Amino acid sequence: MSQHKIVKIPDWVLPEAETYLNDVGKDGWDLVHVYNQHAYMKSSAEGTISSGSLSVATDAFGRQRVSETHTLGDYKHLYAIDFNFLDFTASGATNTFNVNRASVTLQTSASISSRAVHQTKMYHNYMPGKSQLILSSVKFGAAQPGVTKRTGYFDDYNGIFFEQDATGSLSFVIRSATNGTGSLQENRVYQSNWNVNQINSGDFVLDITKTQLVWFDFQWLAVGRVRCGVVHQGAFVLCHVFDHSNYIDAPYMSNPNLPVRCEILNSTTATGSMEQICCSVMSEGGYVESGTTWALTSPSLRTITSASSTPVMAIRLKNTYNGLPNRAFVRMSNLSVFSEDQTVKYRLIKLPQSSSLTGGSWVSVNNASTVEYNVTAVSSSLATERELLNGFVFAGGTGVGNAIAGIGNTPGVDTKINYIAQNYDSTDSEIYALVVTNMTSTNTDVGVGMTWKEVF
């Protein structure tokens, strides 16, 4: 196991610190990074580790952090709980917006099973070969016996997180499962064993009762490096590094596409609370959203009666894909609408759950697709819908059949609203529905088409 040490840089050598550190770094020690007049060194007894590999001036793959990152998700609570979050609570727990603090308080009740989860709907897509950087600002507060608090990039089966456990101990944790519903394994490293900086002495001592900005970056490729730390006085402070290649015999987690999550849970009848404030997920070193494009057209025309509205086509995510919880997300790319005889209005809407759509049946698009469709639904809930796109299609004349198709491009792939995802436990997906309204007093037959991208 590699050894680590902290070397105080004397005041008299600060003007020539680089030369001094090179001298100190002899005899099997490599420089990790410098912070507040301290040099953090790692033994190279098991093979030399270059200073850049652990330097916070580089990303998880050792590239200098000089280029603009690509934001996969950014979240804040300014006027209400961000609509891109979903909440799960059990046994009296609550998630409450703090109007004057731009935060959400997760609170447990006096129940041994009380639990609150506050996480993004988005499972952020990881691009192999790129560094993924996660930032999360929280306030755990003082330790509360019997209460565990977490923040990070994780779900129930995989991920990386910072934890204050039921005894008040702090740790960085990697969670994994060999499959989406398999037994969990957690590699938990407590503060006293952090291998770079335990931030418990010197100029910076972590005060968990105050707000903290926690960061993680990782290589996945199933066997890459994970780095964990906090941001202090504008500087990334590296605390612990998990190395996997050449040490493990299986992937360290089975899915790198994960949400940002905060979680609080009881192991006794105590009550506890924590605050989630803001978070962001970024890809470093370039990013192009990959995915599979699918398209579907109406199998037959549907009759829209006078002045009525009908969800002519809808799509949602399957609950499972190849036997695992379906954590893909879907973006609408474009759509088309055809009216045979009369003028119609069309609206692309987003619905929060399956109960928002009435009638019809759901059919798999294809075994290779994560999506299923419904072309026989009869109505949708106006109270829960979110309208993304609209327009009109003008028919050429009653009975002549020479209508003009309406084509609309949906919002860009970087918009926060243009995607659908599954719920907390992958049992109830959001829905895209294309609703057509007959603007006249005469029936008309319509057909529609959708093209979308499935990302996972």
Image: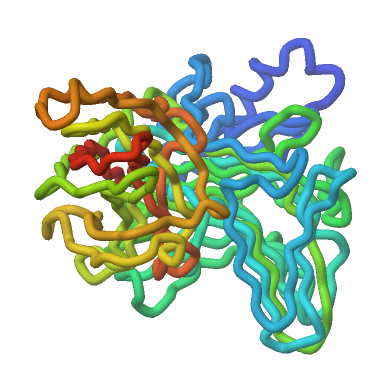
Q: Nearer the viewer, residue 389 or 16?
A: 389
Give residue 27's position: percent from left, percent from top: 53, 36
Q: Residue at x 22, y 55 (%)?
A: 375
Looking at the image, what colour scheme do you see? rainbow
- Is residue 270 rendered to the left or right of residue 299? right
Of residues 179 and 312, the one drawn nearer to the viewer in this rendering: 312
Whole-percent x, y for residue 409 in the image? 32, 24
Q: Identify the residue at horizontal 18%, vertical 40% (top origin).
A: 447
Task: Let me know if residue 372 appears in the view.
Answer: no
Q: Which residue is more in the foreground, 420 or 357?
A: 357
Q: Which residue occupies the extreme top position in the image?
A: 15
Total numbered labels: 0
Decide: is 217 above or below 323. Answer: above
State the image quarter where residue 146 is shown.
bottom right
Left or right of 345, for residue 373: left
Residue 276 image position (x, y, % from top left): 73, 52
**Which of the 4 image quarters holds residue 413?**
top left
